[in-house]
Each structure stands twice: as C-alpha cells, then as structure tokens.
Amino acid sequence: MDYVFLIPMLPLLSFLIILFTRPIYKKAGIVGTLFTGAAFLCSLIVLFSHFAEGNYIVEANWFSLDTVIITVGLEVNPLNALMLVIVTLVSFLVHIYSMGYMANDERYATFFSYLGLFTFSMTGLVLSPNLLQLYMFWELVGVCSFLLVGFYFYKPEAKAAAKKAFIMTRIGDIGLLVAIFLLFWQTGSFELDVIFEAAQAGDIAPSLITLIAILIFVGAVGKSGQFPLHTWLPDAMEGPTPVSALIHAATMVAAGVYLVAVTYPLFSVSEVAMTTVAVTGGFTAIFAATIALVQTDIKRILAYSTVSQLGYMMLALGAAGYTAGVFHLTTHAFFKALLFLAAGSVIHAVHEQNIFKMGGLSKKLPITATLFLIASLSISGFPLLAGFFSKDEILATTYGDGRYVLFAIGLITAFLTAFYMFRLYFLVFSGNSSTEARESPSVMLIPMMVLGALAIVGGYIQTNWFGTFLGDWLETTPYSITFVHHEAPFWLPILASVLSIGGIALAWMMYVRKTTSIKESNERTGLHELLYRKYYVDELYQVVFVKGSRVIAYFWMYVDRFIIEGGAAVITGAVKRFGQAGVKLQSGQVQTYGTVAFSGLVLVLLLIAVLGGYF
Amino acid sequence: MDMDTLLQYQWNSMMPEFTILLTAVALSLIDLFMNKKKDRSLLIWLALAGIAAAIVFLFLQFDDGVVSILNETYRLDSFAKAFKFLMLIGTGFVLLLGVPDESTSVRGEYIYLILTALLGGMMMASSADLITLFVGLELLSLSSYVLVGIRKNNTLANEAAFKYVVNGGIATAITLFGMSYLYGLTGETNIYEIQGLMGSDVVTDNRFLAVFAFLMIVVGLSFKITAAPFHMWAPDVYQGAETPVTAFLSVVSKIAGFAIMLRLLMVPFVFAPGTREVITPDGVNYETLLVSVRPYLVLIAVLTILIGNVIALRQLNAKRLFAYSSIAHAGYLLVPLAALSELVFDAVWFYLTAYLLMNIGAFAVIHVMSAEEEVTVASFAGLFKRSPYLTIAMSIYLLSLAGIPLTAGFIGKFEIFMSALGTEPKRYLLVTAMLMGTVLSYVYYFGFFVQMYFRPSKHQTPVTISNGVTAVLAITVAGTVLLGIFPSVALTFIHDHFQFLEIFNQ
Amino acid sequence: MNDSFLLTILILSPLLGIVLLSIMPGDHRFINYMGVLGTVLPLGLTLIVFSLFDRSLSGVQFKEYHQWFELMTSISPNEPYTVAYDLGVTGLSVLFLMLASLITFLASLTALRIKESAKGFYILFLLLEVGILGVFASENLFLFFLFFEITLVSMFLLVGKWGGFNREKAAFSFLIYNGIGSILLLIVIIVLFVEMRTTNITELTMLLKDTDSLEFLSGSTRTWLFVLLLIAFGIKLPIVPFHTWMVRVHVEAPIAVVMIHAGVLLKIGAYGLIRFGVGFFPEQLKEMAVALAILGVINLLYGAFIALVQTELRSVLAYSSISHMGIVLLGVASFNTAGLQGAVFQTISHGLIAALLFLLVGVLINRFQTTKLEELGGVASQTPLFAGFLLAAGLASLGLPGMSGFISEFLAFLGLFEAMPVIGAVGVLGLILTAVYMLRAVLAVTFGERRTLFDNNRDLTAVELVPSAILLSIIIWIGVYPQVLSNTLQLARTLGIGG
Amino acid sequence: MTGELLVFIILFLVTITGGLLMLNLTKVIHMVMALVLTFLGIAGLYIMLSAEFVAVVQILIYSGAITIIMLFGIMLTKHTEAEPKTGWAKKGVVFTGIVLFFLIMFKGIRTISLGPQAETLHENNTEQIGIMLFTDYVIPFELVSVVLLVALVGAVVLAKKDEEDEKEGEQS
Amino acid sequence: MSSVPLSAFLVTALLLFCMGLYGALTKRNAVIVLISIELMLNAVNLNLVAFAKYGVGASIRGQVFSLFTITVAAAEAAVGLAILIALYRNRATVNVDEMNTLKK
C-alpha cells in the first residue's frame, strides 16, 4: 500500500501542471480527468488492499517543537479508505462532467486546476493520521471551496457567497483549532491514536473532553452547514454546478460528518457531546427541510436538501450510529452528486434556475429526467434504493438509542424530503414544455449514469437482508469504538416507505394534479413567507454579526481617531502652548528677563529657606 | 615683595595667557597704526598664529602637574588646561569664521577683543581666587559686550549689546554679592583656603548664609552658561550679534562658564555644611551643601532642558533657534553636575568638545547664509540643491546636536546619560527631562532636514563660502564624525593628560 | 575570538553601492539599476552567512570582537567602561538577516519606478539597509542602538521626501515615536552598561540570569527596565496605543520603503522584544505575561476591527500589521517554546507577507492610481496574475495552512493555550476577524464587477512578477516545511530557555 | 548712644535717602544727583570701617568719574525727558520679589557676628592695600589693566561716530 | 569694640542692593538702569569692606577686592554708556521699554 501517497499527489500534480502550463490550456480537462481517474484507481486498489492487508500508516517527521516531533503521514483505515473512494470517484466523475459543462468557459483551465487542488486537499484531509495535518487540509478544502464558489468572481453574488462560505466555515474551524490546542496540551500530541488512547484511558478530565468534543463538532458544524452555521451552503450555489455536486454535496460538506466520525472515540466518552451532535443534527435536518419546501431555485432546494441530509447524518452519529452515519454519507454522496449534476444538466440546457419557469423537461431531456427521478427516489427513501437503506439505518439507530423525539423528527423530515424533492421534480420535468432545450452531451451524461447506478445499488452494502458488510468492515477500525447496531423494528421500513411514498403522492397531487390549489411564487404569506425567507436567519446574522461588528469597528476607529490620536494631539498641543507661552514671555523687554531671572533666584532661596527650616 | 620673589614663580605656567595678551596688545597697536582702508585679514592670521602658539605652549605644559603661583591665586592644573584647550580651539574657529572675503571686511577691534575675551575665559579657568576669577569674568564679559555691539550702526546689534550689558551687570552684581558673603564667612578669597574654612563653626552657624551665597554665585554663572531662568537674554543677544560673535558666546563663553562653575562647585563648597541635619556616630552633623542644593540644581537643569527645547520649537529665525538649542545643551551639560556623578568632569568636558565642534559648525553655516538675508529656518529650503556639501556638513552638525550615533554629540549624550544613571540612586528625573528634551529637539533639528532636502529653493545659486569658513566646516565636520566613530581619540587624550582630580589637590 | 570579518563585510556591503551611486552623475539612466545592484551584494553575502551558519552548534557564530573605546571616570580611572565593536549572529538573527536582505533586494526592484531624485533615494535606501543589517548582526547593545538610529534617520528622509501627500507629517510622526522608543532603549542600555559594565548581549544574558547579579539590579529595577524595553520595542512593533505613526507611514511612504518598513523594520521591535525582553528579563516577563497577553489580544482585535472598516487598502494593511503583531506579543507572553517559536515565525512570516502585499499595492497604485477600495473592483479579469497573487497574499495573511502565516499563528496560539487558555479563547476571535477584513479588502479589489475606468491595464511585468513569485514561494515553502526555520532558529539555544 | 553710632546713623540715612530719592524722583538728572548723595554716604561708611583708601577711591570714581560719565550720558541723550512711569503690575512683581529677598537675607545677617574686629586695618591702610596688590593680586591687577583697555577701546569703538557712517543693513 | 555692629553695615548694604536691583528692573531710562547696577555694586563693596573689618580672620583682602570691583564697575559703566549712545544714535530713545525689537 506504499503508493497511497499517489492518491493526493496525482491531483496535486494535475493542479500544478495546469497552473504552470499555459500551452495545454485547452487540454486542461483531459489532464485533470486523467490524473483524477488515476487517483480513483489507486483509491480502489487501496480499498481492496485494505480488505486484504488491514490498516496502514506511514509517518515522517515534519517539524520539531522543542522535544515534540510533529509528523505528517498517511493512514488508511476502513473509514478513510471508503472516503477516498467516494472522493476520488465523485471527483473523477465531476471532472468528466465538467469537460462538457464548462467547455465554453474562458477560464476552463483554471477551473480544472482548482478541482485538482480540491481533490488533493480532500484526499489529504482524509488520509491525515493527525489532527494538525487534518486541520491544514481542512482549511485548504475550505479555500478551494471559496475559490470555486467565487469562480464567477465578476458576479457580486458570487463574491459575497465566496466570502460568506469562507468566513462561516472559518468560524467553525476556529472551534476545531481550539480543540486541537486543548488536546495537544492534554496529551502532548496531535496523533489521533495517542489522543484516543489518552481519552479512553481517562487521562483527560471528562468535562474537558466534552468541551473538546463540542469544539470539534463546531468545526464540523461549520463545514457541514449545520445550524447555526448553515447559511453559507445555499449561497455557495453561486459556484458552477459541478462544484456544487463535488464540494457542496458529496465531499467537502460531508467532511464535517467525517470529522465527527474520525474523532468518534472522543465523542463516545461524552454523553453531552453525543446529545449535542444528535440534537443539532436532528434540528438541522428538519429545519433545512422546511426551508427547502418553498424555495424556487433548483440549486437552492438541493442545497437545503444537502443541509438537511447532513443533519441526518449528524443525527445518526449523535445517536451512536457510527455505521449509519457513514453509510448515509456514502449513499448521499451518490444521489446528491447525481442530483446536482442532473440539475446542472438542466441548467446547461435551459439557462434558468427558477423551477417555476421550467416544466415538461422530461420530454426534452429524457435521460436527465430519468436520472433525476432515480436520484429523487433514492433521496426520498423510496424502497430498495440506496437512500432507503441508509435512512432506515439512521431511523433505526435513533429509535434504538431511545431518542424518540429525534426519531419523530427524522420521520417527519423523511416525509418532507420526499415532498420537496418531488415538488422539484414535477415542476421541472412534468407537464408541458415551453422552452427550448437540448439534452446534454454524453460527456456529461455518462458520469450521471454511473452515479445513477450507484444511487440504486449503493445501499446494498449494508442491509439487514443481505448483510451488514459496511458495518462489519468499519468495525476493523483501529480505535475502540463501541459499535451499536440496532435491529430496526419490523414496522420501521414500512412506515418509512409509507411516508416516502406519501410525500411523493402529495407532491404529485399538488403540482401535477393540482388538486390543492396553492399559488406559489407571488404572494407569500405567514408561514410560507417565513420559510421562503429561511427563517430570517440571514437577516438576523446581518444585523447581529455584520452590523454588530461594524459598530464595534467604528467604535474602535473613533477611539483610534479621537482618543489615541487626539491624546497625542493634546500632548503636542500642550507642548506648543508651552512654547507659545515661552515666546510670549520672551517679550524683548530686558527688564522682564532680569525679573524672571531674579524671581527664579528668590524662589530657590525661598524654597531652600522654607524646606531647610531656616525660618 | 621684591623682584626676586616675583621672579621665583613659575611664570612660564602662564605662557599661553601671556601669548594671547601680547598678541592682543600687539594687534591693537598694529590696528591703531594701520591704514584705515587696509584690509584687516592679516590681523586675523596673526591672531590665529597667537592662538596656535598658545596651544603649543599649553601642550608643552600638559604633563606638568599642578602649578600654582602667587599664593594660589593662579593655578594651572589639568582641569584648567583641559578647558583652556577647548577655549583656544573654539576661539580659533571663531576667528576663522571672521576671515573676510572679497565682499566683506573685518574690524581690527573685533579681532583683539575676541582675544581679550579669550584671555578672560582662560584666566577664569585657571583662577583659584575669587578676585582673579571675578576680574577674568569681567574681562570676558566686557569684551563680549563690546563685541556684540560692534556693528554699531545696526540697531539690532545695539539693542542686543545693551540687553547684554544690563543683564550681565545685574548678574555680575548678584554674583559679587554672593562672593562678598563667602568672603565674609571665611575671611579668605582663595577658594582652596575657603574650602578648608568651610567646615568652621562660623560657617556652620551661618550655614544658610553660605547656601545663599552659593546660590547667588551660581546665578551669576548660570547667566553665563544660559541656564534657565537666567537664559532669557541669550536669544536676543545671539540674534543681534554678528554670527561669529554669537558662536563665540555660545561656545567659548559657555565653556568658560562651565569651567568656573565646576571648579566652584567642586572646590569651595564640597565640604560646606548643608541645610539638613544628619545624625552620624560623632553626633549631629550636616549633610554637605552640595547635597542640600542638589535638588535645585536638578530643577535648573530640568527647566533649562525643557525651556530650551520647547521654545526652540516655535522659532523661525535660525540664530534664535540655535540660541534656544544652545540653552538646551547647557541643560544637558548641567545634568552631570546636578547628578553629582563621578563622571562629571569627563562627561562635561567631552560634551563641551562635541558641542564646540557641532555648534561652531552650525553657526558657521548660518554665517555663510546670513550674507544674503536674515537667516530663518525657511532660508534653508532647497539648500541641498544649491550647495550639497554645505548641506551635508549642516546635516552632520544637526545629527550630532540631536545626538544621533556616529557623531560626537551622541557619545557626549551617552556619557551624560551614563552620569545620570550611574549614580546611586539613579537620577530618573534628569533622565526623563533629557529624554523629553531630546525628542523635542528632533522636531526642530529634523525640521532643517525637511527644509534642506525636501522643500524647493527660492534661490538657485550656490552659497558663497569664504576660505576661513571652509576650513572651519572641514575641521568641525571631521572632528564631529571622528569623535563619533573613534571617541577614544578624545577619551584617551583626556585620560592620558588630564587628571581632573588634580582640581581637589591643595 | 574573531572567526572572520564576514559580518563586517556584510553590514558594510551596501556602502559599496552608496559609493558607486554617489560618483555616478545624478541623471544617469542606470541609477536605478545601480541601486538594485547595490542590494544584490548584501543579499549574496547574507546567503553565504546563512549557508555557512552551523546549525548544529549553539551560541553565537561569526563572532567579531574589537574593543572600540573605553569610558574612564576621573574618580576611578582604573575601572573603565568598555564599549566593544561586537558582531555575531545567532539562529534568531541569521533568520532576520536573511529576511532583511531579501526584502531589501525585492523592494529595491519596486523602487525602479522612482523617477524623482532616484540617486538620493537609493543612497538612503542602501543606508537604511546598512542600519537594518547592523541591527540584526550586532552582538552588542551599543552597536544595536547605533544601527537602530541609522534606520531612524534614513527612514525619516525616505518617508519625508518620497512619500505621499502628507509625507512630512508621517515622517515626523515616525521620528517622534521612534525617537522616544530609541531613547528609552538607550536608557535601558545605559543602565545595563553602568551596572553590568558590558553591553555584550550574550554576556548580559548570562549575567542577568545569574542570581548574584540581583545585587546590581534589584527586582524592581529590572521590572522597570523591562517595561521600558517593552515600550521601546512596543512603539516599533507597534503596540496599541503607540501605533498611529505606523499607520501614517504605511499610508504615506513610498512603496519600496513600506515594504521594508512593514517587512523588516517593524520586526526589529519583535526581534528586540524576543532577544532582549525574553533574554534579559525572563522573570519579569513571566510576572507580566498576563498583561502582555492582554496587550497582545487588544492589538490583535483592535487592529482587526479597525481594519474591517477602512476604505483604503493601505490602511487595511496597516491595521492588519498591528493585528498580526498582536500575535507576536501573544507568543512572547505565553513564554513557552511553542509560543516563542510562534512569535519568531510570525515575525518572519508577516515580514514576507506584508512585503508581498505592499509590493502588490505598489502595482495597484502604478496601474490604477488609487488604493481606495470603492474605486477598485474586478481587477481579476484584466490582471489575473496580479489578482491571483493578491489573493494568495491575502490568504497567506489570514493564516491559510500551507503558507507561512498558518504555522506561526498556530504555534503562537498553541503556546498561548497552554499558558493562558482564556486569553487564547478571546484571541482566536481575531483569526476570524482577520479572515473577514482580509477577504473584504482583497475581494473588493479583485472580485466584483469590473470597472471600465481601468481598461487595458497590463498584468504583472517581469520585474514585478519575479519578486512576487519569490516571496510567495518562500511563504509557501515555510508553510509546507517550517523546519527550515526552526532548524536554523534553535530557539532554546538562542535564548537559553526552555531547557 | 556713642558718637560712632550717631555717625553711622547719619551716614546710613544719607545713603538710604539718596537711594530712595533715586527711585522716586522723576527727572533723570535729579536721580543721578541723588545717587551722588548715596555714594558719598558710602564713602563715609568706608571711613568708619577703617578703609580710608577705598573711601577716597569711592569718592573719586563714583561720586566723581561715574557720575560725570552718567551725566554725560544723559546730556548726550534726551536729557530733558522725565522718567516714564512703569506699569504697576511689573513694579509689584519686582517689589514683592525684592522684599522677599530682603527678608530672607535680613534674617541671615540681622544678628550676625563673626568675631573680633580687625584692629590694624586703619594703620597704613593704603600701604597694606598696596602690598597686597603687588604680592597676591599681581595677576588680577595686571588683568584689570586689560579690562580697562577693553573698556577704553570699546567705548571708543562704540561711541565714536564713524566718518564714513555707512549704515549697515538692518538685518543681522 | 565698636558700638556699631557688623549687621548694621550688612543691612545697609542689603538695602542698597535691593534698591539698586529695584531700579535696574523697573526704571525706564537706560542711564538710570545702568546707574542702578552701579548702586548694586556699591552695596557689594560695602559688604566687602565691612567684612574686611568685622569678618572672620578679618584682613585687608576685602578692601582690595572692593577696589577691583570699583575699577571694573567703572569700566562696565563706560562700556554700558558707550553702547547706550550707539543705540541712541540709531534709535533716538533711551527708554528701555522701546528696546524690544528682538523678540521673535
């Protein structure tokens, strides 16, 4: 497995080559695709070798801090082997797709170089055996996300979105950073295994572990767009759609979930931390789902869906469902990437993102429509598709963990998911078409098909019927995580299926049969408006944080200008005053001079006489 | 006393003074009989020759040890030699500044009055008797009064001279008043005798009178060294006088003032009783007078530094500005005295040396500039474009005055700081005043840089510089830089030749 | 004692350029190139020093010792105070030397644009370099001060003559504040000198560590000396509220000078604080660590907040420097290996980043004649390379991993969290704010709608590209392989702390 | 009351009256004349103090030479002009300062007694002075001649009207 | 033993000194200012002579000192007056208050 290093290196090379070689500007797509494809192959090989050889770790000294040697290295264990495959696969597919999607963009090569950099960072993140390295890549993926969101830099919205994405995730990152500091001073190391050992040996005070775990989770919240740091993710849809698929659906945003999974041994010793994760996840899931109900922008709906699904994963992790969380991460990567790519295909075809201005596209774009349908079904938890199994796993875990409120929320969210996905699907694809549209080129369709296949079959790696391959394999992780596998109650799959189909049906009735007449888009009132405005969270942040910090900033600026500079000016002024007084006293009158001098003498005499006890 | 006794004294110890005296007399005679229309520059060269000869004689005496003649009225010790040396050099520079070129002329009186003033200063440095001291002081003062007013058709000069006379007269009277009490309490005029008598019961009983006498004497001398609040005449007089005379007043006259101030502080008053009682094992005693008055010396030093620097900030006329600057420097020079540091002689002497070089240099520059117009700070605008070398010279003086390293002024200031911080307890008040003063001085010294380098010039032609001034500039620049880079030249020179402690020997 | 004269030659090497420039006629067309060449020699010599520096040895290397002069008091002539000409480098100073000559060289390239009195500019510029190199190569406080003052004078003239509209005011601000700082420093030096009778830095470090020396310098005196040092170098660093001069200089000075100023001169403050503050008065530092850390946090947040609302790029960067220097303070305050190392790293890293940023600002001024944020925007479309570099520099500045800024901030905070977690927790807010103001400023220039006002502007030319690329690659190099710094630094050995 | 004391009181009154008149008269000439009174009074006091020679010198130089010089000075300038009044504020400050000075010094000398008086001063007073001048004080004595030379030259240079009388520039 | 104590002379001298000083600092006529200074010097002389008789180790020195003072005072008066005349020739005033062109 010594070629693991190739996995991050190949995309890095692709990045560098594209960056520094202008002559092959037009071939950038091919270069990028080839390198990423190679990386994907490597990942696959690594995955399979892992089955044979087990875990792998290699480390080298990077930096010394007094006696502490800080290392860099690569680690392969079940979790990151899986992640590697997901990342490189989606990245590879997105590369292919982008060759079509971005073909006419004048910054075609730049785009691919960014993709290469992202893939490098993401694989580096996944392979990190220590927290410092992980954090570095963690930030790097953030930058790539930033660059790609702001790819259309000339659009003010893109600029704002990029900035927002970076800053919001950075807020989370700081939490992670602080957690790393605290861990370092508790354990003297950044190495994950050292840390876990210490945590489980009880070397760290429980309250501190809770604090650290929550801080780590803050990092995850930022990256994974969990409430309350979720607002950047929908805005990040200003980036090119393949980017949304790769970064903001399948990989980077899942890094938060991955992070929690990686540091699971820490969480598992702190009940409070677990509950925090579960509650945040559950709340985010339903919160985002409700917003997704009324959005009109195709990508934004998918974005809120992503937020919601990520919440689901967090919920699973918080409810001790390590496997469930990772499982949903995997399936979600497939169907959500597919959804985005398909949406991209639609946008590519109609140059429009408002779903109310679309319709009937299933005839114009049959393949896209089919694939979109598959993905929608999968995410809605339609029986026997990938999403069905992973979502069941989550619900079962939550139920089994005794978190019934969250379980109920999960159920409602599942229903809402089905509804908004099919609201989207029906509005875009059913009915009659009025717009011109052509099916996308095959270079775009083929990756979608691959993903479509995976969205269908991806769930079979972990089912109660065929076997829990994934769970069993994940248990070979080197860290001692207590794996709780809850057998789903028999009624759960049925209930889930009913809810899913019910959601689809409701959407069908509302948007295809139009039995219930709800007029959207123009006059929104009450709850609808609240949801459409995303609970006014953005506005709240605008007032509290943006305005707030500006107020503080202006306050300090005035302090700077008036108190500090003013203080200096007062001193200079005083000196000038003294000078002026001196000049005035220097009247040119010789007798004044004499008087001053004599007065000085008398004063000194007087002082010496009085103080010396003369009188 | 017959001729034999008179001749047994080591009159050769007065050779430098005799030389100057003879030169002055000879010059006055030559001037008297010389054609009125004739150029007087020859006289300057003669005077310079006299000074050179005096310096040579002084050098020959360097390692002689203490010589005192005529019942200790005249005393030649290292201290006197060191200060005479500086005065001779300084006067030499001043005379060089006066060398006329095609367009200017020089008065004969100017030349020998400078010499008599120098003679007065040298006598002050060597006097061990109040009477000698007083006569020396008056010789210096009177010559200076005349020198200031020598441009008798210039109202500013008249006014300056008059102010100088009035203020000087008052100061002299106060000093004398103090001296009269000093004499009264001890019955002696010789300061070394006085030193011995200062511990007597009479003085102890009237110790306050002794302190007052001391302070009155200090006032008169403060006037000479332009210490606040006895400084106010200086800006007017400096401005009104001809620039070489100003240079003389600010340098030579001040050196003489410091010489005598140091000697008086260190000799007669060093064991005098102060105002406060201290309990010693031998019973109740008094702290020494120096300790008692130290706070007031500190006060004077601090005031001088601050007043000089603060008011200098507001000056537009260059000579006035340098007057205040030289007041400030007097304040710095007072610091080692007020700190009663063991470095006092070394620090004061070295700083005076540095001050001599940089201040004469600066006045030399003003002197050349004043050929055209009244020299204001703004007259320096664009000087670099006009006369780059002159500007660079001026820059070096300014840097040295501001106390920037690699110049003599820095080493001097360094020693002064050391003197204030090397004592126990450390004199933080003095240090703070020095700090504030130095920073303030940056503003006006660097203000010249702004003018010289940054601003455009009104004139385009280069400034004309006479040969004498060129010589002064060259020597002072070289000296300023040399002493900045290799201060050991001067420091080992002091060490090898000047045992300042001789001042204490009876 | 004397290994070689390498350091003397190094320090004086810019003089060759000065001499050559002064004999060239003022209107010669190669004046600017001559000036640049003048900085090449010191750069080469520094590289030699840097490569010959033996990283396996501890202590001072390339030592040169000559007695300079003795101050004798008449009262006790047999105990002279000796001042020596005393050069040498430690791991710490060799890094700063490298930084200084590199940035000076790069800055001299940007000064190629200067037309007005280029000769004078380059002469002063090289003089400034003499001062800077001297400061870092001095093994002696007296020399340190001497070179420190050389930088003061040359900077005054550089800012005052070639600066922007308010140049004279900026020059005087600079002069007054730094003048106060330098004299405070002088006072400290003199107190140490009269008490310890030496100004050799290593010797002083040893002597002051010795508890017997308490009889010379009592604890309270030491505290005062430390506070004076803190103010002296705090003005240079600058620590709020002594920063106003620095903002003025950043805004008014010519770009080449700002590069040196932000890149190297401010670092003298950090260097002094670490070398002398930490080296001489570790106990006092420990006592006042909390206060120092609070100062650091104030600097960090204060600078960041004000940078947030500046409307002019140079002001943003000026306040950003203040903010970043807060991290240096935090590192020093934490007083452990991580923190101190972080402080040093931060100093160097910020030197490089600030130089890069101002280099790019210079390009901005050259092309667009403005640095006002609202007048700029969308330059990425016309000048993608420039925008890319600016963005990269901005990201480096906000501490992006893989660039030098990250590792330094990381270490500083790592140290701080060991010593004072609560202050650390407040301090990390600064990292968020840094991201906010940096992105705001950088994106305002590069992203957004393109202003047609500035059509047809050339992207980076070779003479701009090369220095930018060099700086950026060093920034990344350090970020990726920080051992390159810590290897040389050998912090514990340099300062004699941490075991 | 001894005769000596009586003489002292008379001389004291003469001296002080002269001074006070000088301060309070308005005409300049009168002021100078008032001062002659003081100078003479002081000469009288000198005689009381066994300083006959000094007393003679005092009369010659002060009452004679200096007064005459000053009168010449007044004649050469606007002699008719009465002394203008000085502002009260300034006078007040000066007066206060001087009173304080007087009080401080007065306390020191009020009861001062420094030992027995010298008995031999009046014997060959002039001779004693002469011997002193030509033994201990040769140097200052000679120096005074230079002082007088300077004064002479100075007075000539400054007071003499130049033939060419070229007006120099007003500026320094 | 004289019936007139030392302090009587000293007080006389002090009074004269004070009057002289007052005159020098307040009188407007320059001649009077100069002559006031002479008065101060006279006070000094009186002191010296008094001390010569009654002072510690009384000696002739005081009288000698006073002779020097008188001589120098005369010289000073001459120079002062010469300066005054030169000034008067240019400015046609002897009022001290009007001699204030030098101040800025």
Image: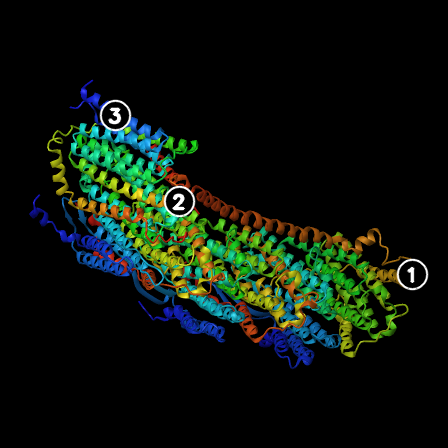
Asked whether, in this view, residue A598 is left or right of residue A370, the answer is left
What chain letter is assigned to the residue under label 3?
D
Answer with left or right where residue A311 lies relative to residue B270. right
Secondary structure under the numbered disc 2 in the rendered image: helix
Question: Where is residue A452 shown, x and y percent of the image?
Answer: 78, 72
Q: Work out whether residue C270 can be spotted.
A: no
Chain assignment, label 1: A
Is disc 1 in contact with disc 2, using a CB cutoff of under 8 Å?
no
Q: Amino acid at mark 3?
A: Phe
Tag 2: Cα neighbours inside 10 Å, few (<14), some, or many (≥20)?
some
Distance between the alpha carbons at the discs numbered 1 and 2: 113 Å
Q: Is residue C259 left or right of residue A238?
A: left
Q: Which mark is residue D12?
A: 3
Please name the amino acid that badge 2 sits on: Arg
Give the colouring mode of the picture.
rainbow
Q: CA distance from mark 3 to mark 1?
A: 132 Å
- Residue at the front extreme of this rendering: D163
Q: Which residue is mark 2?
A: E91
State yes or no: discs 3 and 1 in contact (Cβ < 8 Å).
no
| Secondary structure state at the residue bearing disc 3 | helix
